[in-house]
Amino acid sequence: MPKHYRPAGKKKEGNAAKYVTRTQAVKYLQISLPVFRKLCILKGVFPRVPKKKVKGNHHSYYHMKDIMFLKHEPLLEKLRDIRTYDKKIKKAVSKKNRDLAERLLTRKPSYTLDMLVRERYPKFIDALRDLDDCLSMVHLFAALPAVDRAVDGEKIPVERVHNCRRLSHEWLAYISRTHKLRKTFISVKGIYYQAEVEGQIVTWLTPHALQQVLPEVDYRVLLTFLEFYETLLAFVNYKLYRSINVNYPPILDPRLEALAADLYALSRYFDANGKSKQIENQQEGTNLDESEVRLAQLHQHLPSNEPGALMHLLDDGSNKDDQDLETRECKSLFKNVKFFLSREVPRESLLFVIPAFGGTVSWEGEGAPFDESDDSITHQVVDRPIQGRKFLSREYVQPQWVYDCVNARILLPTDKYMVGCIPPPHLSPFVDNEAEGHVPDYAEAIERMKAAGRKEVLPLPGTGIEDLDDPQGLLVSDRQEAIEAAKRKQQISMLEKQYLDELKLELKGAPPFSQDIDAVGGGDDAISDVQQIADDVSNMSKVVMPRKKRKLLEAMEMSKERKRSSVNRLKERKKNIDQAKNLA
């Protein structure tokens, strides 16, 4: 009998028992393919790649443990009940029994995903780590139009769009209020943001506020993901709001909500909620400590017309010890800077970024906190070449100035960002210029400005910090290093040539001879053969390598060559631009 022979009726072993195809899984669970796909998305079950694909390479395989995990899910029974109920409604409609159909629609069973969120993310830190795709998806659907086309099968309910917009604004309001935003970058796809929440880096993408064209994709799959992400983001927002003693969900001003000023309405809700919490604490607490008494005395000297003054004072006093150095730096970047936004700039993005870094902002339109004629405005953000009227007491800058200041963490000069000027290149804070091998000129200029602000002295390009202690040696260091490198290269070439000559003599049977390296004169042939010798050595090392490691080495070399060619292309472009400027 063969070793791996399995008699008929005996239990399967190996990959045949561990993995099943998607068709087998659907048949085993006795559900349709759309329900199986939806259940896998909600439960976080994904296909596996077994070592040996029993049914062939053109199948998707699932682990049998995952299928058993789905089999005992209570949501599966709920989906079956909903399917049965839909059949009852369809039957009543087909029989033209309108009263029964309406009565059945009012009692249709529903389900929640709260237990799935708690099951997939046992701790709050786990939910924050998996929040990138969630935020990008929610912000995407918040910008999409509501579609209901039965012919194409596309249906994006308007309630889902409004819910996504509400959740996204709640998240942005918390980040802006707690000054957790760290980086931002404007690209063709949209605006990238990066925040640090509870020690976790969260990065998401928001689309531009333009008319969105719906591509031809399966929106049922996207809406299934969105269904889970909405529940997850609601849990996260609730936890974050409760951590700063703010009630959730927030109750917004209907007038501001109708004017599409949701972020400003949320900021006013934060102020009102913090003030009411303080009043309740003062009424309930009978024993005030010394710090609370001092704060109450300071409140009497504050102007009565300043909204939320006491709440800001309490926040500064209570959260000063909890904030880290980076948060304090971000909070004070736009301190004492007052912005006014014109109607052509991206208002929602700037209303999020500017308060996140300590600035005060208003806009052109109804519901704004102050008008354009306010004398205390220091900067007006415009994106038009011609202005109808100008105020001499303020700076007129383009929107890129705000984002570049945020990434550089300093207030950059406004000369290059004036109206009608071509702004400097918008550098990405997500790219490590040192690792890429090319540092743009404007990045070096920003580093010089930051060093000047810290009263530091940076070394010249190509030198180190230790060279600043010896300025005289710095002048002759380049020439000495070049001479030493040439001598070292010549010595290495002589040694390699002597070694090859000795190998040839050993092959011929002649006794090897020793030769003084210093006595041998250098020549152009010896120096030119060094590259050939290095290539031969690298080729020999590749020959003895295993195939897997050789392929990995070749991929690394291709990546380095691609990066090198990209850097050379950037340098060539810079050279051409400089030549064109000189000619002009």
Image (spheres, grey):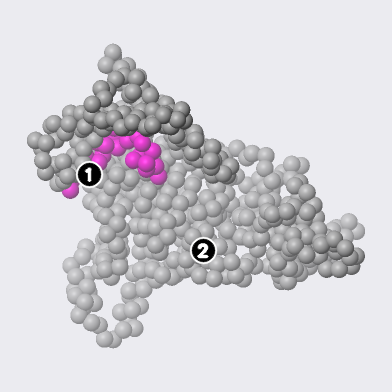
Mark 1 residue element = helix
Residue 411 image position (x, y, % from top left): 25, 44
Q: Which residue is mark 2?
A: 127
Mark 2 Cα within 10 Å, few/some/many (few <14, many 20+)?
A: some
Q: Nearer the viewer, residue 131 or 526?
A: 526
Q: In this view of the protein, which residue sits in the foreground, 448 or 84?
A: 448
Q: Quadrant of the N terminus?
A: bottom right
The image quadrant of residue 530 is top left
Q: Is residue 287 above or below residue 291?
A: below
Extreme-front residue of the structure: 510
Q: CA distance from mark 2 to mark 1?
A: 36 Å
> Main SS type for the magenta part?
helix
Q: Which residue is mark 1?
A: 450
Please give the name of the residue rendered at 26% of the width and 50% of the height, measured from the top-left corner.
Answer: 333
Any magenta on residue 447?
Answer: yes
Give the vertical position of 110 relative to 90 (above or below).
Answer: below
Residues at badges 2 and 1 in contact (C-beta under 8 Å)?
no
State the residue lying farthest toward the bottom. Answer: 286
The correct choice, above or below, for 270 with respect to 387 in the image is below
Q: Which residues are magenta?
A: 430-454
Choose top left, top right, bottom left or bottom right for residue 95.
bottom right
